[in-house]
Image (tube, rainbow, N blue to C red):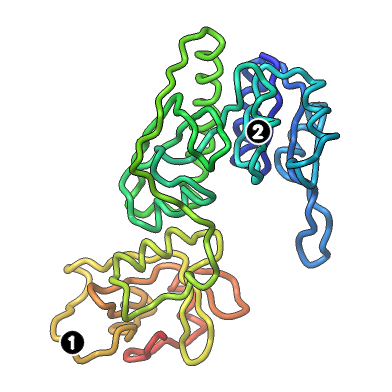
Amino acid sequence: MRIVFMGTPDFAEESLKAIFKAGHEIVGVVTNPDRPKGRGMKMIPSPVKEFANENNLKIFQPEKVKNNEEFINELKALKPEVICVVAYGKILPKEILDIPPYGCINVHASLLPKYRGAAPIQWAVLNGDKTTGVTTMYMDIGMDTGDMILKQEVQIGEDETTGELWDRLKVLGGNLLVETLKQIEKGIAPREKQGKDYTIAPMLSKDMAKIDWNQKTAEEIKNLVRGLNPIMGAYTFLNGKKIKFWKVKVAGENEIYAENLGFLTNGTVITSDPKDGIFIKCKEGILKVLEIQGENAKRMSIQDYLRGNSIQEFDVFE
């Protein structure tokens, strides 16, 4: 099929690779403009642009797509049969949605109508969900509200992070897009309207990364740490210094004797040992820290951290 592909991050790149490998004619690739990154603020192309360059695909990088008549006319001139959109980052106007005869197809990293929005993978982990998946759909003018085509469900590992789930779902998304296009081409693709019971997965905010020891259980803190890894990292303070937790677990009954702790403040270090690590009292349950990052330092195992830094019993994280 003649395809225009629209996407930006590595999640989208995986879908572009998949349809390219499947032999589709990719007549144009639309991605966000290069952005400055790093200390030197060097202009960095998106992963989608890098793949398009490597394979001599025609690239478009409009600053905006709405009310951009020049860009819309360029798209029309390409005469795509379908437009594939994966994590592009911009809402498409009706003028673009109406261009391809087979419609605009989106790959969304959730089992719609659950988790419409910008951060479905992150929220599935943050909420401690056991399952998630990928949905392909026909796009309309709403945000992830179009008719669904195919779905594939996966289990979320008990300790799986957002980054790990992201890497699995991007491959799944590419494969599902290839199958979706195959069924559309054959005229056998299903079309199912979304139910009314939907949830939203909004963009994450920096203020949600701070651990609230008085409001969250050990299980909820574990999900926060998993959900924000590797995006920003959940953090807390110890003796006025910012500490990030990158990997934690809920301590089992066989790991620590934890009776009569009611007198301790939530966030208190119950045990600190260079071999076993640190155990912290929570609103409910006890948290064991496995990977940590001190202020202006690299992330490391708790054992390595304790060799050069002091965390004492009865210290309190805030």
Nearer to me, 237 or 185: 185
Indicate the amino acid at tag 2.
Lys
Side (left or right) of 22 relative to 316:
right
Q: Tag 1, which secondary structure?
A: loop
Identify which residue, 74 or 219, lies in the foreground.
Answer: 74
Distance from Cα at disc 1 to Cα at disc 2:
59 Å
Judge the density around disc 1: few (<14), some (14-19), many (≥20) Cα neighbours within 10 Å. few
Q: Which residue is mark 1?
A: 262
Residue at x-position 55% and y-position 69%: 206
Residue located beneath label 2 in the image: 94
Sort mark 2 into few (<14), some (14-19) or many (20+) by Cα contacts within 10 Å: few
Q: Closer to the observer: label 1 or label 2?
A: 2
**Secondary structure category for the residue under label 2:** helix
**Front residue of this view, candidates 92 and 12:** 92
Image location (x, y in percent) of residue 188: 46, 10
- Going from N to C along the chain, the mark reached first, 1 or 2, is 2
Q: Residue at x 46, y 87 (%)?
A: 238
Give left or right: position of 104 versus 284. right
Q: Is residue 149 above or below residue 262?
A: above
Between 208 and 318, the one lying in front of the other is: 208
Q: Position of residue 8 (x, y in %)?
A: 68, 42
- In this picture, is 46 found above or below 225? above
**What residue occupies the far left of the structure in this picture?**
260
Q: Position of residue 18 (x, y in %)?
A: 61, 25
Considering the image in quadrants, where does the C terminus appear? bottom left
Identify residue type, mark 1. Answer: Gly
Q: Is residue 101 left or right of residue 184?
A: right
**Rendering quarter of residue 60:** top right
Residue positioned 35% across, 78% down in the render = 278
In the picture, measured across the screen, residue 21 lies left or right of residue 27, that is: left
Say which quarter of the image contains residue 36.
bottom right
Looking at the rendered image, the quarter that the N terminus falls into is top right
